[in-house]
Image: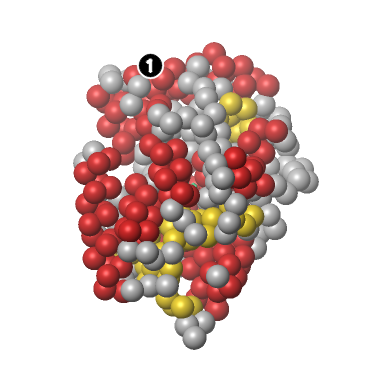
């Protein structure tokens, strides 16, 4: 008998993770499992949404809720109301959620209130910083999930400390599946390096979008000054998140962009093509930290903590907070490219298959 899964996505990293699992679900066949995709609309920008569906072959969403903007309360509340309607209509066996955004939490709440079991991909991650909206979303989503599909042993340990042991599985990281699946395709198809006039190993790639950095003018100023200083020695490519662009203007910090190669948010294949050939990656993104690791590129993380401890413990990632000086110090130490990662803390590239198996077995 076929089971029905409603998958909730809304933001860029969720499209990427869902791409891998949706492919596994499709390959399993509709006689075993059917997926109904719901896009909340959280990221609606063409460059942060539509291109991902086209490029990653994600099924067209059956529902597009078109909910974006507003405060966290407004956005999450509106999503909760709309997702509940979808779930009442679809009556799925499972609701599948990803990561740590407002779409994740809204999906978890809507489903659990209707007693529909929730499967959370990327369960158990913690920054232990309750000021982060993502941390609140993760903790609450995990608490109401029946299947906690963890990417790492550290995530399993975090859940155990919170008393969550039932339905907990280390399935590996679906982002690793994605990084492997698309790496060659990106090298062949992407023209972004030619378009930007970049040579392998002779540029840095940077991203900055996390609220703790963008909403605080001091932190954002330190980060931008650090990137601007690096750009005196090495071109720095910055695909600029629309939130960050707006806040740079609001905080009067746009001048720091002058020496950088600023581009619109990139399509995924262009992004990973740039990652693979960068000399160093500077970021506050969770996904980009790991992609740097998967591709053997040194990473400087502009945050005070990380959920991806393995990348730091194995010597590939340096946490620098939002300090101009620490960014520069880390840059000086990490300029040698190392491509010889032997350790595999994120599984074997079969995480999406594991997610599928757990859904079918549960
Ligand atoms: N990404 C992308 N284009 C960009 C910036 C990021 O395709 O211009 C991809 C990146 O390769 C990674 C994912 O988006 O797979 C990370 O998403 P984001 O940084 O928005 O969220 P986080 O991982 O921090 O939750």
12 to 219, vertically: above or below: below
Residue 296 visible in this rendered orientation of the protein: yes
> In the depicted view, which residue is nearer to us: 139 or 82?
139
The C terminus lies in quadrant: bottom right
Expressed as whole percent of the image width and height from the top left, the position of residue 72 reads 28, 40
- Left or right: residue 195 compared with residue 311: left
Residue at figure coordinates x 76%, y 45% from the top left: 343
Residue at figure coordinates x 58%, y 67% from the top left: 358
Residue 24 visible in this rendered orientation of the protein: no
Determine whether the residue tagged by mark 1 lies in a helix, strand or loop: helix
Residue at figure coordinates x 64%, y 55% from the top left: 170
Residue at figure coordinates x 61%, y 45% from the top left: 160
The quadrant where residue 305 appears: top right
> In the depicted view, which residue is nearer to us: 119 or 195?
119
Disc 1 within 8 angstroms of ligand 1 (CB): no
| Total numbered labels placed on residues in the image | 1
- Circle 1 sits on which residue? 218
- Left or right: residue 148 compared with residue 241: right
300 to 293, vertically: above or below: above
Expressed as whole percent of the image width and height from the top left, the position of residue 315 reads 71, 32
- Left or right: residue 77 compared with residue 124: left
Disc 1 residue crowd, few under 14, some 14–19, many 20+, Cα 10 Å: some
Kindly give the residue lying farthest to the top in the view shown: 325
Expressed as whole percent of the image width and height from the top left, the position of residue 332 reads 64, 20
- Left or right: residue 75 compared with residue 2: left
Colouring mode (rainbow / by chain / secondary structure / one colour):
secondary structure
309 to 140, vertically: above or below: above
The quadrant where residue 65 appears: bottom left
Expressed as whole percent of the image width and height from the top left, the position of residue 248 reads 31, 26
The quadrant where residue 135 appears: top left
> In the depicted view, which residue is nearer to us: 199 or 54?
54
> In the depicted view, which residue is nearer to us: 8 or 182?
8
């Amino acid at each position: 008998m076929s089971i029905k899964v409603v998958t909730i996505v809304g933001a860029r990293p969720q499209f990427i993770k869902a791409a891998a699992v949706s492919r596994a679900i499709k390959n399993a066949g509709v006689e075993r499992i059917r997926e109904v995709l719901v896009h909340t609309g959280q990221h609606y920008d063409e460059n942060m949404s539509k291109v991902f569906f086209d490029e990653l072959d994600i099924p067209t969403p059956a529902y597009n809720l078109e909910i974006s903007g507003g405060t966290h309360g407004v956005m999450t509340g509106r999503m909760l109301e709309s997702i509940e309607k979808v779930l009442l209509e679809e009556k799925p066996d499972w609701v599948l959620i990803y990561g740590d955004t407002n779409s994740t939490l809204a999906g978890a709440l809507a489903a659990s209130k209707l007693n529909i079991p929730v499967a959370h991909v990327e369960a158990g991650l913690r920054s232990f910083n309750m000021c982060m909206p993502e941390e609140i979303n993760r903790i609450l989503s995990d608490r109401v999930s029946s299947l906690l599909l963890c990417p790492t042993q550290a995530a399993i340990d975090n859940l155990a400390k919170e008393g969550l042991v039932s339905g907990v599985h280390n399935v590996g990281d679906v982002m690793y599946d994605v990084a492997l699946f698309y790496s060659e395709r990106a090298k062949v198809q992407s023209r972004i390096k030619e378009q930007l006039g970049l040579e392998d190993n002779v540029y840095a790639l940077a991203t900055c979008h996390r609220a703790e950095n963008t909403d605080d003018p001091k932190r954002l100023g330190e980060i931008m000054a650090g990137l601007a200083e690096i750009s005196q020695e090495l071109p720095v490519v910055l695909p600029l998140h629309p939130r960050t662009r707006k806040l740079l203007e609001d905080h009067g910090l746009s001048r720091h962009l002058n020496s950088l190669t600023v581009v619109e948010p990139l399509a995924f294949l262009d992004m990973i093509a740039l990652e693979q050939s960068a000399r160093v990656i500077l970021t506050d993104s969770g996904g980009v930290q790991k992609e740097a690791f998967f591709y053997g590129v040194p990473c400087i993380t502009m945050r005070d903590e990380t959920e991806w401890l393995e990348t730091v413990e194995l010597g590939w990632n340096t946490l620098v907070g939002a300090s101009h000086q620490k960014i520069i110090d880390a840059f000086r130490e990490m300029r040698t490219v190392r491509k010889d990662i032997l350790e595999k803390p994120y599984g074997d590239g079969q995480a999406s298959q594991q997610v599928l198996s757990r859904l079918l077995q549960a």
